[in-house]
Image (cartoon, rainbow, N blue to C red):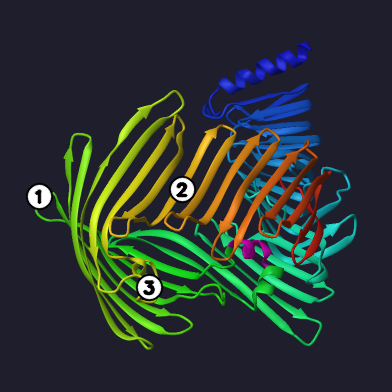
Amino acid sequence: MARNLRTGLFVLFLLCSSGISEDFPIYYSSDISKIELNRDGEPGEIILQGNVKVLFQNTTITCDKAKFNRITGDITAEGSLSVQTPQGLFNADSITYNLYEEKGVLLNVSFSSPPLYGKANKAEKKESLVVLDRGYITTCDLEKPHYRISAERIEYVQDDYIKAERMKLIFGERFSLLYLPRFTLDVKRKEAPFIVGPRYSKRIGEKIDFIFSHRAGEKTDAVVRERISLGSEGWGLGLETFSDKTGYSSSGFVHNRWDDRGIEAGGFAEFGRSYSSPRGNGRVILDWRWMYDNKFFNDFFNDEFIKKSKTYNYFSYTHNFGNTILNLNFRESASEDFLKVEKLPELQLHTPYVQLGEIPLFLENDLCLTNFYTEEENCIRAMDILTVKGRKNAGYLTFAPYVSLGGVSYNSDVYGDRFNLVREVGTKVSATVKKSARRYTGYFTPAVSLFYRGINYKRGEIKPFDRIEEWDDGRFLNLQTDWAFMGRDGYLGRISIDNAYSFDTDEFDRSFLKYDLQLTPHIYVEGENEWDINDERYRFGVNDIVFQYGRYDYSIGNRYNEEDDTSGIAGRFEHRVNQNWRYALEMQYDINSGSFTRKSFEVWKKLHCWEMNFSLTVDENDFSFFIIAYPIFL
C-alpha cells in the first residue's frame, strides 16, 4: 500500500510539471512505475505495471501493463485490458491510443454499448466514431447471440448511425439469411432493422413477409424499407422511403399472382415542405396515390387504406409574394367512385389585404380559375371578387364593415355559358374577453356578422362544384364563438362554434362545432361535428375521448357520416402489463346493422433480444392474423 501511495503522489507531481495539458488533466496509478528521461533529462515515457488505471476526460483504461508518453499523449496497453468510454465498454488484447487526439486502435476486441454488443478483429476509435474491422454487432447480450449483423467493416456513431459494408445477417451460429454490399442503420429512430413473420387473410391467403429497414446514408435521415412477400396467392416486392427532414414519404408494391390475373401494382407519395427565398416564402404539398383497384389497396396498403380511402389525390403549390399569394392545386378522384368533382387544375391569386393610405380601410381580391371535371361534364369557372374592409375599435368591441363585388363565369360543355354576379355588404362585431383561472387562462371571442348577399343563380340552379355554388342570396346573421385555453406549459385546447341564420327563409344553415381539449393531465377530448338545424339532421361527426394513465391507454368515440351512411362507435384499450408484456383490444360497432364491423386483438411479448407481435382481426369481409418477430432495437 505504501508503494501504491508513493506512485500516486509521484504521478500527481508529474501532472503538475510542464508539458502536460492543463485543459486535459490525466490521472493514473499502478503497483510499479518507471520513468524514462529524455535527452534533456526531463521525464518522458512512463512505464506502468500491475493494476494499471489511467483516467483521461471521459475515458478510463485498466490493464496489467502500459506505456505512456507524457509529451505526445501516446499510450500502449495490454493484459486484462478494458477501456470505458462514452460509447461503451471495450475489452481487448491490446490498445494503441492517443489521449490528446482521442483516437487509437484495439486488437481482438469485444464491446458492450447497450443496446448494442459486438466483437471485431480490430476496432479504431476517433472521437465519437468507432470502426470495427471484420466483426459483428447485435442487440443480444449473450456470448453466442441469437442473431448478428456480420460485416467486413462497421462504422458506429453513438445515437446516430451504424454503417456495415459487405454485411451478412446471421441467425444462430451459421445460418445466413441475407447479404448486402452496404447497410446503414438509423440508431436515432430506434427501429428494428428487419421484421419477419407469417400472415393470413381470407382475401389474400397465407403469406410470409420479410421487411428490411435501413438509412439511405450516414449523412441523411432518409429511411428505406424493402418488403419481400411470398404467399399462396403469389409473390410481391415493395419499396418504401421517407425522410422527416425533407418531409416526403413514398411507397410502392408489385404483386404477381400465380393465376392468370398476373401483375398488380400500386403506390403512393406524400410530400410537405415550406421554403423561403428572397422573393418570398411558400409551401409545397403532395398527397397522391395510384392503385390497381381498391381491393389491392386494402390488401397490401391496409394502414394507408384506412386513412386515405374516399379522399382525393391532391397537389398544391403556394407562394407568398408579400401582399399577394399564388396557389396552384390539382385535385383528382384517385379512381374513387365516391368522389365526383375533380380540379385539373385550379389557379388562385389572392391578395389578403392592402391598406388604402393611412385610413383603416383594406382592399382584398380573390382571383380564381378552375378547370372542373365530373362524370357528366367539363366546366371552366373563372371568379374574381373584390372586397373593401374597414376596422374600428371601440372599447372592448371591434367593428369590421365590408362590401364586396364579384363575378363568377361558367363555360360548360353541357350547360353552355353562365355568369353569376355576386354582391355582398355587411359588418362583423367581435370582442375578446380574458379570464384567468388556477390551471389555465381562457380567451373568449364571440363574433356576430350581419350581411346581405345578392346573386343571379341561387343554390341548386348551378351544379355544386365547391362551396361557391352552395351560396344563397338574402339577409343573413352569422354567429361565431371561439374559446382558446392556455396553460402554464402552453396550449390546452380550443372550442369553436359557427352557424348562420337566414332572415328571408327564417331558417338556420349548417352549424359546426370543433374542439380539442386537454381536460386533465390524463384525459384529452377532440371532435368535429356538422348539423343541418333546419332539417334537424346530424350530417357528420367524429368525437373521441382519450384516457392515458400509467400503463393504461383507452379511447372511445363516435363515427357518423350521412353521405356514406356511416354510424358507429370505435374504441381501443391498451395495457402495458410489465416490461415484457402488453396487449391491445380494438372494436368498431355499426349502429345501423347492430353488429361489430371490426374487432382486433394484439399482443406483444419480449423474448430476450426479440419481440413477438401477434395480431388477430375480424371485419365484415375478412378474417386475418399475423405473427411477426423482430429484434428489440431500443
**Which tag, 1 or 2, sits closer to the chain's start?**
1
Q: Which quadrant is the N terminus positioned in? A: top right
For disc 1, the neighbor class at 10 Å (few under 14, some 14 to 19, many from 20) is: few
**Which amino acid does the dot numbered 3 rest on?**
Gly
> Can residue 221 be seen in this snapshot?
no
**Which tag, 3 or 1, sits closer to the chain's start?**
1
For disc 2, the neighbor class at 10 Å (few under 14, some 14 to 19, many from 20) is: some
Q: Residue at x 71, y 43 (%)?
A: 573
Q: Which residues are magenta?
A: 301-307
- Mark 3: which secondary structure? loop
Read off the residue under disc 2: 514
Q: Which quadrant is the C terminus positioned in? A: top right
Left or right of 283? Residue 334 is: right
- Mark 1: which secondary structure? loop
Read off the residue under disc 3: 460
**Which amino acid does the dot numbered 2 rest on?**
Lys
Q: Nearer the viewer, residue 285 or 39?
A: 285
Percent position of residue 296, x then y: 69, 74
* Residue 268 against residue 576 in the figure, above or below: below
For disc 3, the neighbor class at 10 Å (few under 14, some 14 to 19, many from 20) is: few
Q: CA distance from mark 2 to mark 3?
A: 28 Å
Residue 305 part of the magenta segment: yes
Q: CA distance from mark 1 to mark 2?
A: 36 Å
Read off the residue under disc 1: 359
* Residue 438 against residue 363 in the figure, above or below: above
Left or right of 185? Residue 561 is: left
Percent position of residue 449, x then y: 26, 50
- Residue 411: which quarter of the image? bottom left
**Which amino acid does the dot numbered 1 rest on?**
Ile
